[in-house]
Image: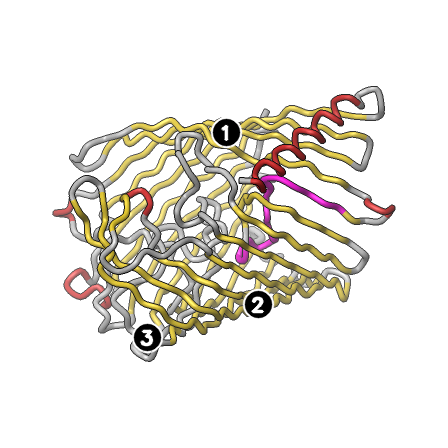
Amino acid sequence: MALRLASLTLIFFLASLTAAARAQISSSEIEGEYEIKFDFRKNFALDKSNRDDLFRFDQELQLRWLYRYDDWLSVLLEGQFVGEHQLYTGGGPRRSEFDPERGETWVRFDKLFGRNLSFTIGRQSFEEPRRWWWDEELDAVNVRYRPEPWLFELGVARELFQESLRDNSVDPEQSRVIRVLARAKWAYLKNHGLDFFFLHENDRSATPARGATVKEDREDPSDGRLWWTGLRASGIHPARYGNLSYWFDLAGVLGREKLLEFDELPGNRLRVTSRSNHRVRGWAIDLGGRWESQLAAEPVFILAYARGSGDKRPTTGIDRSFRQTGLEADDEQFRTYGELLRPELSNLRIPTFAVQFPILWRSYIEFAYRNFRQVHAAPFLRGEARIEAEPNGISRNIGHEWMLYSIIRQWKNIEIELVGAAFRAGRAYGPLSGKMAYSLFTQVTFEF
C-alpha cells in the first residue's frame, strides 16, 4: 500500500509541476483511436455436436493525452473503454459487457545528466521489436540508456492496481508478482545487431494448502520463481536480387514452480485437490529468414522454424518443457504461431512457410502454412491454445493450419485487417483426427 501511495503521489506531483510550468517551452497532444472487430469461430471443439460456434463483435475506444515540457520531461495519461458483444453462440446464452480500463499513465525524464538517458515511472509499455519476449503494459520503473552503438534497458515491475475499473483487485495470477526485465542491444554492423534478454519473475502470493477453498474469481493455478535468459541475432542484407533479412532467437528458462489443481464447489468456490512442486529447465529456438524478391509481382518469401523443449519423463521432479514469459504479445496482431491454434511455444515443433504479395502501394496479402508437432507426446498443449479438444498423449501430430492474411493501409487514419484460417486436426486428436476448425477475423482501426 505504501508503494502504491508513493507512486501516485510522485505522478500527480510531477503532473502538477509540469502544468505550473506552461509558460516555458511545452506542447500538449490529444490522440485517440477507435477499433471495431468481428470474430467468427467454427468447430473449435472439433466436434459439431458441441455447437461451439461463436460470432463476436468487439469495440474499443482509446484516448491519450501527452504533455511535453521542453525536451526533458513528458507525461502520458491514457484510458480505454472496451465493449464485447456475443452476437451468436451456437444456441447458448449471449452476453454483452462494457469495461472501462486504465492504460499507460507515466512520467518520463529524458536526457538526464546531459546524456541519452531516460527514466520512466508509472504504467508503461514494455515492447521489443519481435514481441516474442515481451509486449505488455506494466506498473513499473524503467531506465533506458543509448550510448551508440548500444542500447541498455532495465525495468522493475509489479501490478499495483487492477487493469479493469470493474474489478475489485488485481488479477490473482498477477498479484504480488515482481518482475525484473533487462535488455541490451549491440548494433555491431550497419543493419545487423545482437540483443541480450533477461527476465526474472518472482510470484510472492500465498499458495493455498491442499484441501483449502478459494473463491472462483481468485483462482491462481501456478506460482513460480523463474529466470529467462537469451539472445537474438537479426539483420538485413541488401542483395542484388532483393533484400534478405534474418532472425535467430535462443532462450532458456529455469527455476521452481508450484502447481495447483481444483474441483468446483457450490457457491462459486473451488477446493484445492492437488499441490505439486517441481524444478523447471527448458529451452527454445525461433529462427527464420525473409527474402524480398524482385520477381514478377514482387513476392516476399518467409521460412521459419520454432521449437520449444518438452518433458520426456514428467515424473522425475524436473519439468523440462519450455514456457514463454507470459508477457509475449497475445493480441490479434501476434500470429507468429498461427491465427487459429495460437499455442504457446512449449513441447512443440512449428515450421512455417509464408508468401506475401504487395497490393496497391501500402498494403499486402499473405498466405501462410504451419505444421504443429509435439516434441514428446503429451495429453495437453501448454497455455491458452484456442482448440478446445485435448490431444491423446499418444501421437505427436497436432495438425496443420492455413492462414490468409491481408492488411490495408491506403488511407492516412484508417487500417483494415482481414484474416481467414483453417485448422486440420492431426492424429494426436484420435477419433477427431481430420476434423476441421475455421475462423474469420476483421479489424478496422480509426485514428484521430
- Quadrant of the rendered structure where residue 447 is? top right
Residue toward you, 189 or 327: 327
Amino acid type of disc 3? His
Q: Which residue is mark 3?
A: 376
- Quadrant of the rendered structure where residue 85 is? top left
Q: Which residue is mark 1?
A: 80
Kindly report the distance in space between the C-alpha atoms of the residues bearing marks 2 and 3.
24 Å
Q: Residue 124: where, in percent of width, then height?
A: 60, 41
Mark 2 or mark 1, earlier in chain: 1
Q: In the rendered image, which quarter contains the C terminus?
A: top right
- 370 displayed left or right of 12: left
Q: Residue 372: where, in percent of width, then height?
A: 35, 65
Residue toward you, 322 or 315: 315
Give yes or no for contact between labels 2 and 3 (Cβ–Cβ under 8 Å).
no
Give yes or no for contact between labels 3 and 1 (Cβ–Cβ under 8 Å).
no
Residue toward you, 200 or 390: 200
Q: Which residue is mark 2?
A: 229
Give the residues drawn in magenta, as a range. Answer: 118-133
Identify which residue is drawn at 37% across, 71% down. Answer: 278
Residue 27 is a magenta residue: no
